[in-house]
Amino acid sequence: MPGPVDPEEHSTFLQPRFDPTPAADCSYVVTVIEGPDAGTSLTVNGAEPPVLLGQSTVCALRLADAEVSRRHAVLEVTGVTLRIADHGSTNGTFVDGVQIETARLRGGESVRVGATVLRVERIDGARAPSIPLEVRFGRMLGASREMRRLYPLCRRLAASDVAVIIEGDTGTGKEVLAESIHEEGPRAAAPFVVLDCTAVLPSLMESELFGHERGAFTGALAQRRGLFEQASGGTLFIDEIGDLEPSLQPKLLRAVERGELRRVGGDKWIKVDVRIVAATRRDLDLEVQEGRFRDDLFHRLAVARIELPPLRERRGDIAPLAAAFWAQLGGNPRGIDAAVIARWEKHTWPGNVRELRNAVARQIALGDLEIAAVDASPPPDGARDFIDAVVSSRVPLVRGRSTVVDEYERRYIERVLADHGGNVVHAARASGIARRHFQRLHARTRKA
């Protein structure tokens, strides 16, 4: 994510396109009227980010119903309606008896999840807290409604010392948000140390985390402090924690819970004072459910949760982000051509903010030779050889490759859903990807 921008040179950054929709003069109360949690209620308003309903500890409306999935559905006030979306649940979500994937409620509806029935009521005149007008939190830049709704939560978490899990697709800026939480909090002057679980060999992970004594293993020629010790007094950011080896998870749990560790080959316990911020692209609830991630470690880390939206859901952020990257990478002070921004705003950005930064870098380096990736319409179903047709069209390589990948994803999702009777959970498992990522691919391919 970009650092500070000189406002005199980059006026685009000074004019973020805020979502003009104000926080509505209404809120919604969702009350459990049947089921184990009868009487429990949750108020949802337009100033808050989407909230989860389900069995998991990260859900704002947590249910004990065994027929409810860990993350069953998502609730969000948009305009004057309450949007409810099934989150790939096992048993489905029903509104007034009709199974839905997504629905907009206006109050008075009955929602059934598992054996639980909820009543939705609209409260008029209850103005939601205003959404902040600030366009960044620390290093995190974003003027869209989806990002600005996150900033109050980020500030509260920065001022606290609780463990945080940041979820989101690859490239959405999870590490930047983690560093911003650190820098905006009381540990700002202490170390911010990063461990990427995908970048360290499993055989070396324990030593990387906890350090080792001299002679602990072949090649251990000197004593070495691990990342936990290096982060003492500050923050340890564990990136892609869902990829952490199961054998190391109980050792990490002890270090987090008791604030102590033992180096590999050592015989004494060492006290540490570390705040943990973790990030993942995986659905950790699913990982817990399938036995790949320890439930007790998940509960210890998921004291607070933030989900970063993908860039395709943050349309108002593309121009200011591009302007900030342009400044950071030394682009012409006159700014980016409006036609380039227009092309970028049509793209779905599967690589998210990281992909946008790369596009800006290419534009600076290549200028008019740079062809921005844009969404392409799928080919006719009757095409005899789709790839040959794309090659024959003589489109630039980047655009042609994007077209082929988009069509492959569309056909793959369609086929795997057909193979599993439309069951998203089973289709995602067969595809080898997280359910949430599968759902996003499904939604994108249906729009194409």
Image: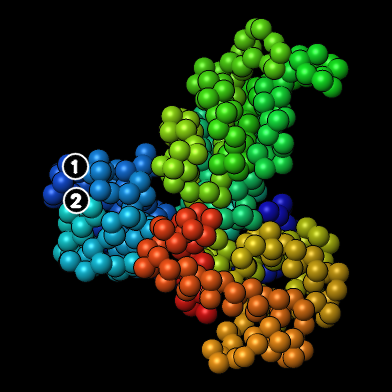
Q: Looking at the picture, how far across and down is residue 414, in whole percent?
A: 47, 74
Instruction: Look at the picture and state if 297 lies above or below 374.
Output: above
Under mark 2, the amino acid is: Thr
Q: Which residue is mark 1?
A: 37
Q: Which residue is mark 2?
A: 116
Q: Where is the N terminus found, in terms of image quarters?
A: bottom right
Question: Would residue 436 be seen by someone viewing this image from the given angle?
Answer: no
How far from the left and from the top, in percent, is residue 50?
39, 55
Furthest residue toward front: 419
Of 104 and 184, the residue lying toward us: 104
Question: What's the CA distance linking mark 2 and mark 1?
Answer: 8 Å
Whether pointer 2 and pointer 1 mark residues with C-beta atoms closer than 8 Å, the reply is yes
At a point 71% along the width and 52% down the height, the residue shown is: 3
User: For the residues carrying marks 2 and 1, which lies nearer the camera in this image?
Assistant: 2
Would you say 378 lies left or right of 8 here? Answer: left
Name the residue at 71% across, 24% down. Answer: 207
Q: Secondary structure at mark 1?
A: loop
Label 1, residues with CA under 10 Å away: few <14, some 14-19, many ≥20: some
Location of residue 144 with respect to 404 vertically, above or below: above
Residue name at image x 58 percent, y 63 percent: 311
